[in-house]
């Protein structure tokens, strides 16, 4: 699909007047050496280097590449750089607006360009995960016959969102989130280079820190906010983008939150303590502060998983699965959508019944172990599978629980030193009330005082 008259006119205008283009477009890297971040993909001999023909090996054999990573970290940029470096036609489609008809038009145009004047085509397909199976199938002939060099981008796990035949014919490259250092380097370049702001303004540390929080690891967002702040400063006749000017330009107040200092730990602590205290509104407030400050969503998800066991436990056995599912989802989707998942988990945990017995139980058990109350494993519980074990008395007298009514055999499991100790003391909150009833009956049967199922069975059956 060739550019229409409006697209061509816009591109011609940008060539004549580069300043009319957004800063993020003007600062787009022209070579792989200008790309910030993704150094694991840019080393000598790496797939991207081979794809553009670096090194003695020539162009890489793979004709299809899938770029997987969160938004704003350079997927489109890498595709553009590859097309520039290889001197190929570059056609960009978005799976949000394009369909099979548009894909086929591009493929047909690529075949004509290759046959007519020997020009190969790079097809960059953004958001490929939004294509249906049938739509993705339409790409296979072009990939197999190398009519186009397909570079597809996705923010979702390609093993779930892209059909296997296309994956097997592609080179999957995982992009890593941009660090603050990566974004700082990009902004310094944008401030000083002629195609950027050409030294018209400077950026003090507090304003840069706010920009990094706003960006949340997204290069486009960082450059867009920087351009807005610079425009506002220049309009005021200032040569510095102050924090106040930046806040006014992007309509977003600076949140007091230092990811490397006390605020990082204070706000995280307040989030967990609010969940523990069942104050869902306060918990959401602290969650919002962490999200708005650009906190790593994986850090927040880890804290929620800990809270699910530390403060809820068996009072709501679904709390931990919810927190784990949230962590897995966050790792797959990233911000901004991850905010919804973190909110979901935070609300569920804050409103769940609370019990800290998982915490106190393991704490008490660890205290005894560290105090030397370890003791020997009772001989009837020891491994009896190897030759000579029976002569040592190992597994002799072990009662196989499934052979007795109720599947609970009256026998000693703990070492002598702690026999009779009670580490788990359940509450009567939420679902743990059921466990409170069960544990007492089980303990009675283990002592042989609980009626049916306590002493029956085959006695010396060796299942150890």
Image (cartoon, rainbow, N blue to C red):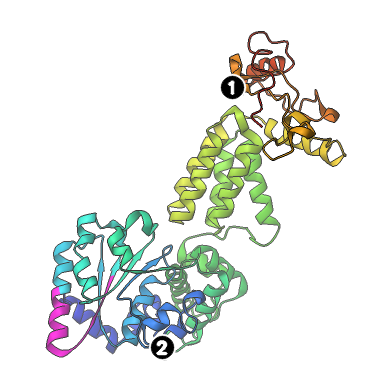
Q: Badge 2 is on which residue?
A: 54
Q: Quadrant of residue 298?
A: bottom right
Q: Which residues are magenta?
A: 108-124
Left or right placement of residue 367 versus residue 215 in this view: right
Compared to residue 5, the image places residue 372 above or below, namely above
Instruction: Measuring from the top left, give residue 6's x and y in whole percent.
Output: 17, 76
C-alpha separation, residue under disc 2 versus residue under disc 1: 66 Å
Q: Nearer the viewer, residue 38 or 44?
A: 44
From the viewer's perspective, is residue 104 above or below residue 274? below
The answer, for residue 335, to whether it is visible in the render is no
Q: Residue at x 21, y 61 (%)?
A: 137
Circle nearer the N terminus (2, 1): 2
Q: Kindly identify the residue that appears in the image at 15 percent across and 76 percent down.
A: 4
> Where is residue 96 drawn, in percent x and y?
26, 60
Quadrant hosting residue 274: top right
Q: Can you see residue 348? A: yes
The percent position of residue 300, horizontal first and vertical second, equals: 57, 50
Residue where numbered disc 1 is placed: 402
Q: Is residue 76 or residue 441 the one in the foreground?
A: 441
Q: Measured along the vertical axis of the image, is residue 409 above or below residue 71? A: above
Name the mark nearer the viewer: 2 or 1.
1
Q: Is residue 105 above or below residue 413?
A: below
Q: Residues within 10 Å of mark 1 (few under 14, many from 20)?
A: few
Q: Is residue 108 left or right of residue 121?
A: left
Instruction: Determine which of the numbered discs, if any, sits on residue 3 in the image.
Output: none
Residue 114 is a magenta residue: yes
Determine if the magenta segment contains residue 184.
no
- Which residue occupies the foreground of this view, 158 or 343? 158
């Amino acid at each position: 699909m060739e550019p229409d008259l409006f697209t061509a006119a816009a591109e011609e205008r940008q060539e004549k007047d580069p300043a009319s283009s957004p800063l993020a477009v003007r600062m787009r890297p022209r070579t792989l050496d200008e790309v910030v971040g993704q150094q694991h993909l840019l080393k000598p001999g790496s797939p991207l280097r081979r794809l553009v023909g670096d090194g003695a090996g020539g162009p890489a054999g793979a004709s299809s590449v899938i770029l997987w990573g969160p938004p704003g970290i350079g997927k489109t940029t890498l595709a553009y750089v590859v097309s520039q470096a290889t001197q190929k036609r570059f056609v960009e489609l978005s799976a949000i607006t394009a369909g099979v008809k548009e894909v086929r038009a591009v493929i047909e145009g690529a075949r004509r360009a290759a046959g007519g004047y020997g020009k190969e085509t790079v097809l960059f397909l953004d958001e490929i995960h939004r294509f249906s199976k049938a739509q993705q199938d339409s790409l296979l002939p072009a990939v197999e016959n190398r009519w186009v060099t397909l570079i597809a981008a996705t923010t979702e796990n390609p093993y779930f969102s892209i059909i296997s035949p296309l994956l097997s014919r592609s080179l999957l490259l995982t992009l890593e989130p941009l660090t603050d250092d990566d974004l700082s380097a990009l902004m310094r370049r944008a401030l000083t280079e002629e195609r950027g702001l050409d030294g018209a303004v400077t950026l003090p540390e507090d304003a840069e820190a706010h920009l990094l929080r706003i960006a949340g690891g997204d290069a486009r967002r960082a450059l867009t906010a920087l351009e807005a702040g610079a425009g506002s400063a220049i309009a005021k006749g200032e040569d510095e983008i102050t924090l106040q000017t930046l806040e006014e330009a992007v309509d977003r107040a600076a949140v007091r939150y230092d990811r490397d200092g006390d605020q990082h730990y204070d706000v995280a602590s307040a989030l967990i303590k609010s969940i523990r205290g069942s104050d869902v509104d306060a918990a959401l407030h602290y969650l919002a502060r962490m999200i708005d400050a650009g906190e790593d969503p994986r850090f927040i998800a880890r804290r929620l998983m800990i809270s699910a066991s530390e403060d809820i436990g068996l009072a709501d056995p679904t709390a931990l699965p919810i927190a784990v599912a949230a962590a897995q989802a966050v790792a797959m989707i990233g911000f901004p959508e991850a905010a919804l998942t973190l909110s979901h988990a935070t609300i569920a945990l804050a409103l769940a019944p609370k019990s800290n017995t998982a915490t106190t139980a393991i704490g008490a058990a660890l205290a005894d172990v560290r105090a030397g109350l370890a003791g020997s494993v009772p001989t009837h519980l020891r491994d009896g599978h190897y030759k000579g074990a029976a002569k040592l008395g190992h597994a002799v007298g072990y009662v196989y629980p499934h052979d007795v009514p109720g599947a609970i055999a009256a026998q000693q499991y703990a070492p002598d030193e702690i026999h009779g100790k009670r580490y788990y003391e359940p509450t009567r909150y939420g679902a743990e009330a059921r466990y409170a009833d069960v544990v007492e009956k089980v303990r009675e049967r283990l002592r042989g005082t609980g009626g049916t199922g306590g002493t029956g069975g085959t006695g010396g059956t060796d299942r150890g």
